[in-house]
Image: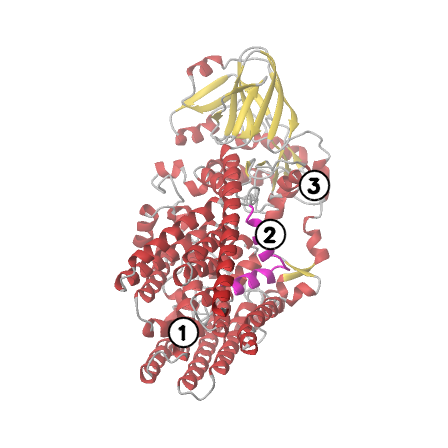
């Protein structure tokens, strides 16, 4: 009996060991002293530098940073973990050498999901592989979208706990659901959490219909109530960052533009629909889920020396070796892409089998959520449908890159496919019916792939927007290579599907034992997934630790600027792309940066003023012979300047080369200045437009200003000087000859910033579309700004209580369960 028990349980440590070997073996470079060169991680390290340095030496957290976009909350930069005690467990689960640890976390989650479904543990291993090795995961790991990868890795953990609650133990499953929801949400990628919610919504609908059919609705209702309470409890453990994030969203690009609403481009409460749907799959592009290079693969891909493109480049006199590894192989309509959402040819074949064979509401629920996500991934290619969701479905308009919704397929395709495989291998269908389904599945999947081999023009013209930047005579050779890539991958998919179908057919006809069938299918899955994944995460993406450490080597120009001992000024770095590159934020307080959720008003300023000013500056700079001449580009001519916003934002230095000296702007308005007039305006469009029509040195543009402020704004010789700086607190000494209006070159944000004059709190009003403004009375004063949003303090408190309550409840439930098992065991022995 003991031997049988050991044999039964041996699969679990074997599975864990296999997952460790698979995940760490996929990225052996981590054992060679190499580090993955992730662009978004590099950007994050730059944008988070000021806040990180502050947090190392202070007990409180830097909730605001001035290192990027002239100032913004850190809630979208740094994950707030204070108060959430469940992070103690999730840190253990996520421990290990990255990026292998991400893959391992996902593999285990997928394995647990299929175990919760009641499947054979050996088949569950295949499910873990299917949910993990979709090529999209490799692409986001390589790019450095770590929070997204961790959020995806926790999706099957949440699904497993929900399934366990309905199938096994409602109370314990619900508590595990609360815990896994806490893990998933604390990964801090709301868009992935939103898509997980869609899956759960469809799954619960399917379970409800099944319960009604089986006359078990009361039991379903009780479990569902527990699940909903658990989900809410799991969410509240992350209130520490959810509340500040929700509060900030309204004012960020995710909340929409007041200008866009006025011009009809957005609802004013969400993203502009054109921006949100930029990354839309075209309808035929969806077939790259089964054929990786159906649309060419990556926007920056490699061809070999035998390619037509290589030969043509050589004929044209180019150094083909230097460019052949960076060719625009992708020819679809997305602006650019790292690669396809390849789900695996074999797994899609199994999914089709599931659609044919599996019966009941759950199958239809999975089919429904798959179809919905596919249609939404088409974005502007099915504009009426996207617009419907954009306008009427809560929160949908907060997210961009609509093609990301296909992560739903990463969960659903293996879920139905592996479930169908298990049923087949357990002989739950008549052999004749199973064989018929096998032939139909083979015809649909392998048949289409074979058709793509024979008629590649099914995919379209093989030309795309990126081709416009290439020499015309190179295009025919590139088209030929793109066709060859499609044929090659289509044939690859045919072979893999035929192999899997053949193995299953042999199993159905009892030619081989089930465990061997599973082993062979597992091997075929690895042959399918691993080479495809290696296209997007391979040795070329790793660098040595010494190179990695030197990514932010201080340039001569950085050293020069840092000699300026003033507490606070800003920098514009033109050596990169100022508004999509955070590198300057590592050493400086930059007016640029990189963040897809920056303050919407600042984005408006970038589009309406900073970009035109920057272009004007660059054009004029080409005509300058000296740095002094360049400095005069910022000059005022009477009351006019072509650079009013850069001056307003205290842009003191402009970097145009990393090696020389920067251009100094002597006309920057400083940290604060007293204005002698207020220009009243009546709306956001008038407010942002008036900035260039007044002299911002002497006039503040204000929307519906208080009448006493307008009367108070008179000429004076007053001064306001910054005396103390930290990300969360700014202090000034003011010497006012009379009551006056002071404009501060700081970004106005209505939630969290408070101001005091000599200890008495005073209101902060907005001027010049984005700056802070105070009414300061006559005399000598101490002015203090501090940032501590109530959403943060309240969120941390809620997180503390909810996470502690969750962990104690889970511990009590586990103890209760163990005591019950021991009692039942003793009763059996008696």
Q: Secondary structure at mark 2?
A: helix
Q: Nearer the viewer, residue 655 or 628?
A: 655
What residue sits 59% from the left and 36% below the top? 66
Q: Judge from the rendering whether residue 690 lies leftward or rightward of residue 386; answer left or right.
A: right
Q: Residue furthest bottom?
A: 511
Q: Judge from the rendering whether residue 680 lies leftward or rightward of residue 654; answer left or right.
A: left
Task: Name the residue that disc number 3 marks.
Answer: 558
Image quadrant containing the N terminus: bottom right
In the rendered structure, are the residues bearing label 1 and label 2 in contact, judged by CB atoms less than 8 Å apart?
Answer: no
- Work out whether mark 2 precedes mark 3 in sequence or the reverse, and give the earlier one: 2
Q: Is residue 555 magenta?
A: no
**x, y percent for residue 459:** 39, 69
Read off the magenta span: 85-109
Task: Name the residue that disc number 1 marks.
Answer: 350
What residue sits 37% from the left and 66% below the top? 284
Front of the two marks 1 and 3:
1
The numbered dot on residue 317 is none
Q: Is residue 153 above or below residue 786?
A: below
Q: CA distance from mark 2 to mark 3?
A: 21 Å
Locate residue 17: give its quadrant: bottom right
Residue 610 in sight from this viewpoint: no
Q: Judge from the rendering whether residue 251 lies leftward or rightward of residue 138; answer left or right.
A: left
């Amino acid at each position: 009996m003991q031997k049988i028990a050991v044999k039964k349980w041996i699969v679990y440590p074997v599975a864990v060991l296999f997952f460790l070997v698979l995940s760490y073996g996929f990225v052996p470079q981590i054992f060679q002293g190499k580090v993955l060169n992730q662009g978004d991680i590099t950007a994050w390290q730059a944008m988070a530098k000021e806040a990180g340095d502050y947090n190392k030496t202070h007990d409180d957290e830097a909730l605001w940073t001035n290192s990027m976009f002239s100032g913004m909350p850190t809630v979208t930069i740094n994950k707030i973990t204070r108060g959430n005690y469940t992070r103690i467990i999730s840190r253990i689960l996520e421990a290990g050498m990255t990026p292998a640890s991400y893959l391992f976390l996902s593999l285990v989650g997928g394995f647990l999901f299929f175990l919760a479904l009641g499947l054979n543990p050996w088949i569950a291993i295949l499910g873990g592989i299917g949910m993990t090795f979709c090529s999209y995961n490799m692409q986001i790991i390589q790019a450095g979208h770590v929070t997204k990868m961790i959020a995806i890795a926790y999706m099957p953990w949440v699904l497993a706990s929900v399934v366990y609650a309905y199938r096994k133990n409602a109370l314990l499953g619900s508590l595990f659901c609360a815990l896994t929801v806490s893990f998933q949400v604390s990964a801090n990628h709301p868009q992935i959490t939103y898509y997980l919610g869609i899956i759960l919504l469809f799954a619960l609908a399917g379970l409800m219909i099944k319960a009604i059919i089986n006359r078990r609705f009361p039991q379903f209702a009780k479990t569902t109530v527990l699940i909903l309470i658990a989900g809410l409890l799991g969410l509240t453990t992350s209130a520490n960052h959810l509340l500040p994030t929700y509060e900030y969203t309204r004012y960020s690009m995710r909340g929409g533009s007041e200008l866009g609403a006025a011009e009809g481009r957005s609802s004013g409460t969400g993203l502009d629909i054109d921006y949100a749907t930029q990354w839309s799959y075209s309808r035929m592009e969806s077939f790259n889920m089964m054929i990786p290079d159906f649309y060419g693969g990556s926007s920056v891909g490699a061809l070999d020396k035998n390619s037509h493109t290589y030969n043509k480049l050589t004929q044209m006199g180019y150094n083909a070796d230097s460019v052949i590894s960076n060719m625009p192989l992708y020819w679809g309509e997305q602006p650019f892409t790292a690669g396809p959402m390849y789900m695996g040819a074999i797994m899609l074949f199994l999914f089709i089998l599931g659609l044919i064979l599996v019966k009941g509401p759950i199958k239809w629920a999975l089919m429904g959520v798959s179809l919905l996500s596919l249609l939404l991934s088409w974005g502007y290619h099915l504009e009426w449908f996207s617009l419907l969701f954009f306008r009427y479905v809560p929160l949908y308009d907060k997210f961009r890159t609509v093609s990301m919704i296909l992560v739903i397929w990463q969960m659903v395709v293996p879920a139905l496919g592996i479930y169908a495989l298990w049923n087949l291998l357990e002989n739950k269908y008549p052999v004749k019916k199973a064989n018929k389904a096998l032939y139909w599945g083979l015809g649909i999947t392998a048949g289409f792939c074979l058709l793509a081999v024979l008629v590649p023009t099914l995919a379209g013209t093989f030309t795309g927007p990126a081709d416009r930047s290439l020499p015309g005579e190179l295009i025919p050779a590139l088209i030929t290579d793109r066709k060859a890539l499609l044929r090659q991958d289509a044939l690859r998919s045919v072979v893999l599907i035929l192999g899997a179908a053949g193995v299953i057919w042999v199993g159905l006809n009892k030619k081989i034992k089930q465990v061997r069938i599973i082993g062979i299918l597992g091997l075929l899955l690895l042959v399918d997934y691993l080479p495809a994944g290696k296209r997007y995460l391979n040795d070329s993406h790793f660098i040595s630790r010494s190179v990695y450490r030197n990514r932010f080597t201080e340039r001569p120009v950085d050293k020069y600027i840092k000699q300026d001992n003033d507490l606070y000024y800003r920098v514009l770095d033109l050596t990169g792309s100022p508004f999509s590159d955070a590198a300057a934020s590592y050493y400086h307080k930059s007016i640029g940066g990189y963040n897809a959720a920056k303050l919407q008003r600042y984005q408006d300023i970038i589009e309406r003023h900073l970009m035109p000013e920057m272009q004007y500056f660059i054009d004029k700079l080409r005509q300058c012979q000296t740095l002094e001449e360049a400095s005069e580009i910022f000059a005022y001519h009477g009351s006019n300047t072509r650079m009013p916003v850069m001056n307003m934002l205290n842009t003191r230095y402009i970097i145009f080369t990393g090696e020389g000296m920067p251009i100094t702007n002597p006309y920057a308005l400083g940290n604060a200045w007293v204005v002698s007039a207020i220009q009243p305006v009546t709306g956001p469009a008038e407010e942002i437009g008036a900035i260039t029509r007044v002299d911002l040195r002497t006039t503040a543009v204000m929307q519906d200003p208080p009448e006493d402020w307008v009367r108070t704004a008179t000429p004076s010789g007053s001064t306001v000087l910054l005396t103390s700086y930290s990300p969360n607190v700014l202090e000034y000494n003011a010497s006012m000859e009379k009551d006056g209006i002071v404009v501060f070159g700081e970004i106005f944000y209505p939630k969290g910033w408070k101001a005091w004059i000599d200890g008495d709190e005073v209101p902060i009003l907005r001027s010049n579309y984005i700056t802070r403004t105070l009414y300061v009375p006559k005399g000598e004063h101490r002015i203090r700004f501090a940032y501590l949003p109530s959403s943060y303090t309240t969120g941390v408190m809620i997180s503390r209580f909810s996470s502690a309550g969750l962990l104690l409840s889970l511990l009590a439930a586990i103890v209760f369960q163990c005591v019950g098992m021991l009692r039942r065991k003793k009763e059996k022995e008696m």
